[in-house]
Amino acid sequence: MNLTRRNFIKAAMATAAAASVGVTLPKEVEAAEAVDKWVKGTCRFCGTGCGVYVGVKGGKAVAMKGNPDAKTNFGFLCVKGFLAYKCMYHPDRLKAPMIRQKDGKFKEVSWDTALDYVTDKFKYLRQTYGKDAVAYYGSGQCTTEETYTFNKLFKGGFRSNMVEGNPRLCMASAVAGYISTYGSDEPVGSYADIEKSKCLFITGSNTSECHPVLFRRIMRHKLTNPDVKIIVCEPRKTSTTKIADLWLPCDPGTDLAVFNAMIKYILDNDLYDEKFVAQNARITNGKEVKTIAEYKEFLKDFTLEKVEKLTRCPAENIKKAAEWFANSPATMSLWCMGLNQRVKGVWANNLVHNLHLLTGQICRPGAEPFSLTGQPNACGGVRETGALSHLLPGTKPVANDGWRAHVEKCWGVEPGTIDPKPGFHTMKMFDALGGEADASKPIKAMLVSTTNPAQSLPNLHKYIKGMQDSFLVVLDIFPTRTTQLADVILPAAFIYEKGGIYGCSERRSQLTEKAVEPVGQAKPDLWIAAQIAKRMGMEKLIPWNGNDSMKANEMAWDDYREIIKDTDHTLAGATYSRLKKEKAGLQWPIPSLDHPGTERRYVRGSDPMFNHEGFKAKFGITFDPARKINFYNDAKKEGKANIFMRPFAGAAEVPDADYPFYLTTGRVIEQWHTGTMTMRIPEIARAHSHAYLEIHPEDAKKAGITSGDMVEVASKRGKCVMPAHIVSGTLPGVLFVPWHDQAFVRMINFVCNDAVDDTSFEPEFKIAAVKIKKVSGPKNVAEKFIIRDVNSKFS
Ligand code: SF4
């Protein structure tokens, strides 16, 4: 099959849509319809949380279709979700545990041998080097039950806070933005606000490729309501930008100035909602409360003209965006990693929240600041269960004495034994990872679950040796760049082979039922965690070590629900038996079995926390009966949100004479994360197999580059070589490379910057200064490259 990318996407989307509404079906779906049963689940990929049904025939998954009752996708799926089942039976699946031998090659072993080996090694390293010598690195792709269990094992069992997960690399700035502004993580409203909005402000999100089913909702809303305004703030003219009524192009990292200019224009022209601000927010520099007049003075240099010069964003566009944002009956913002993966990601998030709070565009239907997540369970799993080095379940800080005592009591561990000191954030953790021979590296071992840091970390060269030298245990379903550096590989079950809960961006938890048996000897991560716990003498802490995966899932889920039942994240009403019946899942807070879930937080009549006595007592919160809105997690207990005065600060690295271009990175619709799964779905792999360098025609001309030429792109940290794609429309001087390609020479993370935000510790994947040079004319780039052999070298 030799389809163009455009035709491929069209065909795939049409197929997906047809399957969901039952119209004439293409051949592939017709065949797939003859299944034994359809089993309810959630999509494995982008974080939209599309509801699916897995078609099972003869004990194997043979088809997928959208769940028409799902509130996330109403039955539609993108090409990845629709074809996900195809990777499950790829011949590369890891089917048996393996231990690396003295000759460097892996040898298959039994589960008992592998688990005994891992546990003995962990015991020895903890005993020799201290409790923090063994770390866990998890993923927004694990189920909530798995992430919760590993967090419990390490923080409650090992008494170590060396627990991190890859959402640190994609969503940490959004978390810190929500918590610093409102006192609590995760969005106020729901995806349903898309259809209620009259203005959509999309910034740092190429929604069309990264969250395609949500983009479909946006497009349909716009098509049926042409008066809806769409503003996109992005350096690139992406496929999302192409549907915008207004584009705010600006150099990478300069959007903070654009947001401040919008705020200044809103304040100077009395477009703000004075009453809303007085009742529900405070303007602050982080130390003192400030007045509107003082905020105006703070913003005095953010004139439209000056900001145009600084950012390249036309003054007229900024003015129009400010007017549309403030004057619209309902404005919704959507953002993702373009805002988060930055050294000033938290400030960028704060400024978007400021726009909403100042204009009162929040806590109403269609009016809300909504951060999208890029993984199926970054929210429900890692954020909500507190599986980061500074958190405990309920997204509460490990440093909080009261909450630590509560968790210790629930877990039945001795009071005062959970470490109050946060562990290392992701980049510091990998920096501190090394072998026993290197005394400067305090972390000696790491258990990596369902993620691929040896491809996905920025500034990769710096971190490979640590992974190679340490005792590295990797749970995954396929060979990856990370398994190439591992000492032990444990074959993991796929989501439809084990079941479990995913929580998507809109606070919605959805249950996936186990549909089929795992391939080979693959096992659920939950079983692996519980077996390690048992061997460590921690069976009492984690007793769900039986072979019935759904039963173990439910035990872990109930344990987690109990801890958070008196928080604003409460899932008390979301029992397994209820989630099995709820076709669309449930949005927290869900305080009781008869509660329908919460579409909008902080609003009386919608948010159940206003009447939750346990919550009020536990956190000492009172609600003023006269107030409709209450940001009840406010540290000052005034029920107000913070409007932070944030100055302009750009990227950690800006172009100069030696490295004259901005490089930004991202995803394409067909491929997901490091391509581990999507590159093993033949139709998708063919459609977009390799990385490329997107370059503006003017820049290409100056560098003597024509389409398809092989170009070297280099930063101070590393270089890659890949074909050029000449794309007009984007800002000259800005280059783009997608990051799914596993080929060593095209892994763009060698080039990316690992400088981190000083609050969220999220690295600046999105911006690096680079130079380019033509290496040769067009070359036959391998159509499809994946790591197939566990014994192949990392090169
Ligand atoms: S939009 Fe995201 S969640 Fe939905 S089918 Fe596609 S990859 Fe899956």
Image (spheres, rainbow, N blue to C red):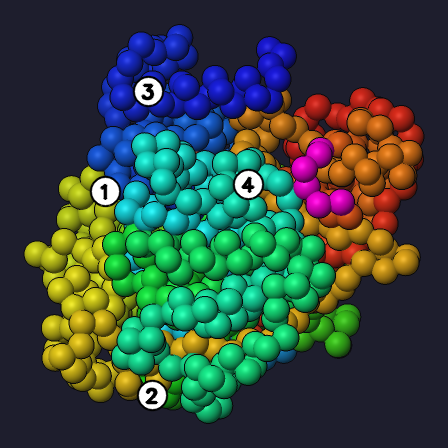
Which of labels 1 and 4 is toward the front? 4
- Residue at 85 percent of width and 60 percent of height: 656
Q: Residues within 10 Å of mark 1 (few under 14, many from 20)?
A: many
Q: Earlier in the sequence, mark 1 or mark 3?
A: 3
- Inspect this view and state whether residue 754 appears: no
The residue singled out by tag 2 in the image is 636
Relative to 515, does residue 421 appear above or below in the rendering? below
Respond yes or no on whether mark 2 lies under 8 Å from ligand 1.
no
Judged left or right of residue 319, residue 455 is right
Span colored in magenta: 727-732
The residue singled out by tag 3 in the image is 19
Tell me the distance, in whole angstroms, between the alpha carbons under discs 2 and 4. 40 Å
Q: Earlier in the sequence, mark 1 or mark 2?
A: 1
Q: Which mark is residue 241?
A: 4
- Residue at 32 percent of width and 32 percent of height: 224
Q: Residues within 10 Å of mark 2 (few under 14, many from 20)?
A: few
Judged left or right of residue 696, residue 4 is left
Relative to 697, does residue 267 appear above or below in the rendering? below
Tell me the distance, in whole angstroms, between the alpha carbons under discs 3 and 4. 29 Å
Asked which secondary structure carries label 3, the reply is helix
The residue singled out by tag 1 in the image is 584
Q: Residues within 10 Å of mark 3 (few under 14, many from 20)?
A: many
Q: Amino acid at mark 1?
A: Ala
Q: Amino acid at mark 3?
A: Ala
Tell me the distance, in whole angstroms, between the alpha carbons under discs 1 and 2. 36 Å
Q: Quadrant of the N terminus?
A: top right
Q: Earlier in the sequence, mark 1 or mark 4?
A: 4
Q: Give x and y (percent) for residue 671.
A: 57, 35
